[in-house]
Image (tube, grey):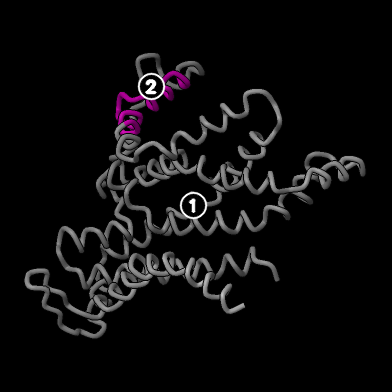
Amino acid sequence: MKNSNFMAYFFLAPALILMGVFVFWPVGFNTYLAFNHYEIAGGAVEWNNFDNFRRIWEEDLFHQAVKNSLLFLLVVPFIQLLSLLIAKLVNNKMPGMTFFRAVYYIPVITAISIAGIVWQFVFKYDGMLNSFLSTIVHLFHIFPQDKVVDIDWLGDPDIAMYSIMIFTLWKGLGYYMVLYLAGLQAIPAEVEEAAILDGANAWERFWKITIPMVKPTILLCTMLSTIGALKVFLEVLVLTDGKAETYTALYYVYDQAFRNYDFGVAAAAGLVVTFFCMILAAIQFRFFGDK
């Protein structure tokens, strides 16, 4: 028994060391910085209690960033619902399903910088989206023939945040589809067959068998997408660079740390974002977790 315990700790040790170096130590050092004023030149550190938190609390820009990050949570239910529906569709045993699974997964493995450049062309004035909408409205005679749709998708403060959500939805669908697909394929075929023999239709099987049995996957995907929404940064950077009212909480952290070199304030803001993530994760565990 002692020998087996030693082997267990031996194999766990590398993972624990990596987590300690790349997860626990950064979190601990970030917490330390949040209560200090840090000078990058010379590395001088001065304890300042809650002064960094007071500064971000009094700053309107941080309030706007948090507001945008909370608004971004709107993408969570859409991405979960669509991912589950697509996973349900591609889980059918029909010819060509492997191709469709690959097509939906391609955005996940596309570099976000390249995807951002492509979508900037989609969102520009004479881009694909405005051209498509112009074609639609002309077909139905909504506008005069010489009138075109010229929406500033990334420059209009009322629209830009929603444009980034569309981009995030497109990029993340395939990732959650794969997770839901794994959950669906873990459902024993005998359960579905028994329900069919009992006369349950497709809708009843979906609500009374599929949803309860993929509940752990729903919890995992919802938590991941919620945390991802609160930490949205790269999507903002590649599409708008924080302009047009798209300044998010994590973008504020990046700005304070690497443009203003105020690491104490950045660490305090990062700690607030982490706290929000923990609260939402606890709520989701309470809502979706087994009781």
> In which quarter of the view is residue 185 placed?
top right
- Left or right: 96 in relation to 213: left
> What span is in magenta?
118-137
Tag 1: Cα neighbours inside 10 Å, few (<14), some, or many (≥20)? some
Frontmost residue, 4 versus 81: 4
Earlier in the chain: of badge 2 and badge 1, it is 1
Q: Is residue 102 above or below residue 227?
A: above
Frontmost residue, 188 versus 176: 188
**In the rendering, at what x and y percent does residue 200 appear?**
87, 43
- Left or right: 79 in relation to 206: left
| Residue at (38, 57) in percent of width and height | 231
| Residue at (33, 52) in percent of width and height | 233
> In which quarter of the view is residue 254 placed?
bottom left
The amino acid on which the numbered mark 2 sits, given as a three-letter code, is Ser
Q: Are the residues flagged by discs 2 and 1 in contact, CB closer than 8 Å?
A: no
Quarter occupied by the C terminus: bottom right
Q: CA distance from mark 2 to mark 1?
A: 27 Å
**In the rendering, at what x and y percent does residue 48 appear?**
20, 84
Quick check: is 45 in the magenta stretch? no
Q: Is residue 32 above or below residue 242?
A: below
Frontmost residue, 119 versus 182: 182
Numbered tag placed on residue 131 in the rendering: 2
The amino acid on which the numbered mark 1 sits, given as a three-letter code, is Leu
Quick check: is 128 in the magenta stretch? yes
Quarter occupied by the N terminus: bottom right
Q: Is residue 50 above or below residue 240?
A: below
Tag 2: Cα neighbours inside 10 Å, few (<14), some, or many (≥20)? some
Which residue is the site of mark 1? 74
- Left or right: 15 in relation to 251: right
